[in-house]
Amino acid sequence: MNKKSVRDVEVSGKKVFVRVDFNVPLENGHITDDTRIRETLPTIRYLTERGAKVILASHLGRPKGQVVEELRLTPAAARLSELLGRPVVKADEAIGDAVKAQIAKLNDGDVLLLENVRFYEGEEKNDPELAQAFAELADLYVNDAFGAAHRAHASTEGIAHHLPAVSGLLMEKELDVLGKALHSPERPFTAIVGGSKVKDKIAVIENLINLADNLLIGGGLSYTFLKAQGYEIGKSLVDNDKLDLTLSFLKKAKEKGCNLLLPVDIVVGDAFSNDANTKIVPINEIPADWEGFDIGPKTRELYADVIAKSKLVVWNGPMGVFELDPYLNGTKAVAEACAGTEGYTVIGGGDSAAAAEKFHLADRMDHISTGGGASLEFMEGKALPGVVALNDR
Ligand SMILES: Nc1ncnc2c1ncn2[C@@H]1O[C@H](COP(=O)(O)OP(=O)(O)O)[C@@H](O)[C@H]1O
Ligand SMILES: O=C(OP(=O)(O)O)[C@H](O)COP(=O)(O)O
């Protein structure tokens, strides 16, 4: 990576503002998945062990510039303290004199967590005054919030213009792994794209056609490809204004030598529910009054075979409605194939990461990104504002 990391700068005795992504799922005030907190421990420990005063900042949810009591970061501070085995001071604000006074009391190696930065209107607007107010709290800025790196906000981008700005260890790891996949992939390189809508995945499909040897398409977005080729898709999800676009993807894949595979059979159902009637049909026999909810067994085998022979696999988006029992087998088969392949497997966050967890296969993947939207934008080939703003090496 051509951006400086926390390893490239002196941190001892410094006040370090570390932007993390503690946007974790909460139920009744309890954190149901602390992965994002655990993944920042290497950076926090790196800093505390070297005698830095660590000032953590994060958003949680989308409070839209208002104080929302349920979106305070208090549970995250408690969880972090347990994980670190040391106290974490929790501030009730993210800027201002009271916070400055709390920071002044920190000893070298202490950790403080600021309040939710999205309680301030200026955060999402990338207000320079708010960025300046954050910068006044510290001597150095470290961005470890890969999950929010696609946002140009005051604490992810603006602040980097006011302080020396470097990446944290999680950010560095994410960019290294995803960057290697996109810039110097081991081949055969297989990309798997699923999920619900073509419109959300246009840019990533376009970019991956240029890069991957195999592109496996599944999930709700397959039906737009199938309809464009003239198949009856019944009541399946479709983006009717993207039919020509999907045909152009097929053409482009042929030109580029990318082996773009579509489902050959489908699990259709009569309802979006756990007790739906289902049947398996080849793609030319989808009944007009049924809906496609998953890839079928032949497709599972075909895709698993390609994955098994790959040196690098990047997966974004489920193969079917894996949240429902009748429609989870396609996603499960792809997750199992990813877990079993000798190749290096990268899961692009979001629902694919949730699926890997659901099937207890997460620890058999090589890298599960902490960013859904961020990893998608990265795979689309877009520059991430939170990374661009960091100091060059
Ligand atoms: N055939 C399908 N019909 C309708 N919805 C689908 C189908 N296949 C997958 N989905 C849904 O797509 C959703 C995930 O889509 P998306 O957000 O694009 O994925 P990701 O978060 O991995 O990028 C899942 O909730 C899943 O139920
Ligand atoms: O959870 C996040 O996004 P993700 O679910 O796409 O990974 C990030 O914390 C970004 O949050 P945002 O989409 O409210 O800016």
Image (tube, rainbow, N blue to C red):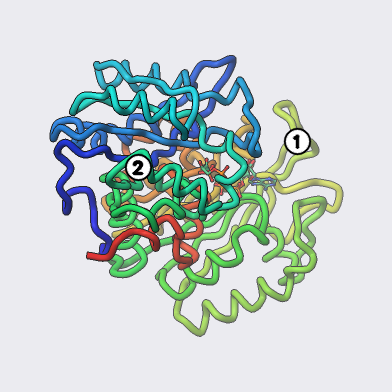
Indicate the quadrant containing the C terminus: top left, top right, bottom left or bottom right. Answer: bottom left
Note whether residue 4 is visible.
Answer: yes
From the viewer's perspective, is 360 left or right of 325? left
Whole-angstrom CA distance, mark 2 to mark 1, is: 28 Å
Quarter of image, res 391: bottom left
Label 2, ligand 1: CB separation under 8 Å: no
Q: Nearer the viewer, residue 288 or 93?
A: 93
Vertical order, 262 against 92 (above or below): below
**Within-10-Å neighbours for mark 2: few <14, some 14–19, many 20+:** many
Q: Are marks 2 and 1 in contact (CB under 8 Å)?
A: no
Q: Which mark is residue 272?
A: 1
Give the residue furthest to the right: 289
Residue 296 pos. (x, y %)? 60, 48
Q: Secondary structure at mark 2?
A: helix
The residue that appears at 37% across and 56% down in the rendered structure is 313
Q: Which mark is residue 72?
A: none
For badge 2, the amino acid type reads Ala
Label 1, ligand 1: CB separation under 8 Å: yes
The residue that appears at 21% across and 24% down in the rendered structure is 107
From the viewer's perspective, is 23 left or right of 45? right
Residue 328 pos. (x, y %)? 58, 37
Vertical order, 201 against 301 (above or below): below
Query: Mark 2 or 1 closer to N-term?
Result: 1
Which residue in the structure is indicated by mark 2? Answer: 339
Note whether residue 337 is visible.
Answer: no
Indicate the quadrant containing the N terminus: top left, top right, bottom left or bottom right. Answer: bottom left
Residue 392 pos. (x, y %)? 27, 65
